[in-house]
Amino acid sequence: MTGTPSSPGARSAVALCAGATMACVGVAALLGWSTGTPLLASGVPNAVPVAPATAVLLGAEGVALALLARAAPRARALALAVCVAGVGVVALAVLRMAGLPLANAERLFFEAGTPVHGAAVGLLSPLTVVAFGLTTTALGLLLRGSARSRAAAVAPGLAAGLLGAAVLVGYAYRAPLLYDTALIPMALPTGLGFTAAGVALVALAGSAAWPVRAFVGTSVRARLLRAFVPLGTAVVLIHGGLSVWAVRATSPVLVSVGVALGTAALTGWAVAELAGAIGAAIRLAEERRLHAERERAKLVEGDRLREEWAAMIVHDLKNPLAIVLANLGLLRAELEPERPDAEDALADAEAASHRMKRLLSNLLDVYRLEAGEVVMQPVPTDVTALLETVTARTRSAALHRSIAVVRRNGRGGYVTADPDALTRVLENLLDNGLRHTPAGGRIELTVEPAERTARIRVGNTGPPIPEPSRTRVFDKYVSSRQEGRLAHQGLGLYFCRLAVEALGGKIWVEETAALPTVFCIELPLAADLGAVEGV
């Protein structure tokens, strides 16, 4: 970030240069008064010079701002003293302009000389008083140190800078309305000093304050503003200069030709600069878009490789797992009846192997469902019979954990579903219930018809799922905290959601008085129910 418009180093350098400029203006004016060289105090011949009081304050404020930019040890103390002095001088000037008895208080700083063009020499101009009030306010806000006060310092600092810039333009165009008043005009060096003060104050306030934050950074908006604002300002100033020259010219023909040529050249230059700035902004936006597309392509390719790798691992693990299950079956057939401990160990091994098989199948099918590669084969399926089959498979593992699996009476009829996918969904929900239901608890399965749908409920007496987490448990790799413990929701519930939605159904979680956690599945009833029942 070093060297960019928004970097602290760049802002400190700008504030240091502006503060030094302001201090030089004050010192030059004081030298002009002390050596009898009016040009040092006025900047141009036969013009109103900088008042000594103004020169002292400009020099002191410039030094304070430069020291603040350098973060010097005693910079804040000096800046505070300058603020107090500024308030005092502004107050005295206001009393003098109001005609109060302190009318000659400013003469403590100087001996008034001969008036210049009828204006009193050495007294603060009303514009100078206003500008000092703005810079003193901005400096005081900066000294408070908070982010809010620093942001608030931008407005008075910017106003003082614009006031000084308007005075410089007035002198450049010889337009007294921009710097003169009915009492005393502002001197040219004073306008330069306040312009520098505004720059220093805005730079010290930081890039987070308006309007500086609109100009900093690498965004297209900031780049265009940095190009357009200086360009627009230059166009206005050049056009104003041409207009002033045209008004003062003596030859109408020369004026017409000069203004026409100058306007044409100015317009061409402005259009070329604007086109270049817009083109650079468009190129920047296009480069960013291409970079984002390349990064997205890398992410997509990474996901594809990861999914292929996972699918390969699943396929490789399924074969040895099938061999393990087959051998467990042979061992069960050969097991002696008087070995109940071996029976329990065999049951645990079979349950763990079946669960591993489900997990591998979930991992593989989740990637396929996300990619749209799994084609469901919905057929009229007897959901009641399917529940009986799944319940029977689970009772052995549940009995080993002292968990009751209860199948409530009810007939849901035939639903339109893929039997294998629906079986996997129910097995995952039962497996989830076994993992979260404490010993002595129960799991209940019910099915009941609804309007054009059948509703399957798989509930358990385990801890409830908090309300905010009931939709997130079906997301991929979600963890939710339940009653002080961290319950990891892997791919099982995510697979359930993908499969049920692929079958045209819905799945959600609810809570009842008897069952804290109930998973509900709603599937469409088979269209031709009569034909199915008649088979």
Image (cartoon, helix red, strand yellow):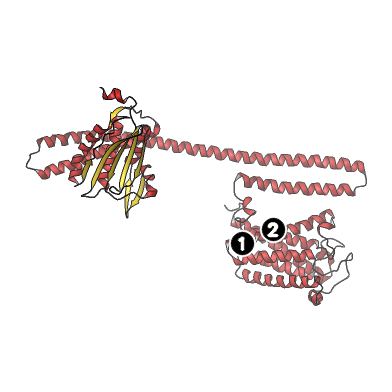
Mark 2 element type:
helix
Kind of residue at disc 2: Leu
* Percent x, y of residue 14: 66, 58
Q: Which residue is more in the foreground, 241 or 374? A: 374
- Residue 158 is labelled as 2
* Percent x, y of residue 329: 15, 35
Q: Which residue is mark 1?
A: 150
- Residue 346 is labelled as none
Q: Which residue is more in the foreground, 533 or 259? A: 533
- Where 468 sits versus 336, above or below? below
The mark tally for this picture is 2
Query: Whole-Å distance between the Cαs marked 2 and 1?
Result: 13 Å
Q: Is residue 107 visible?
A: no
Other residues around mark 1 within 10 Å, as few (<14) / some (14–19) / many (≥20): many
- Where 497 sits versus 117, above or below? above
Residue depicted at 64% across the width and 54% down the height: 212
Kind of residue at disc 1: Arg
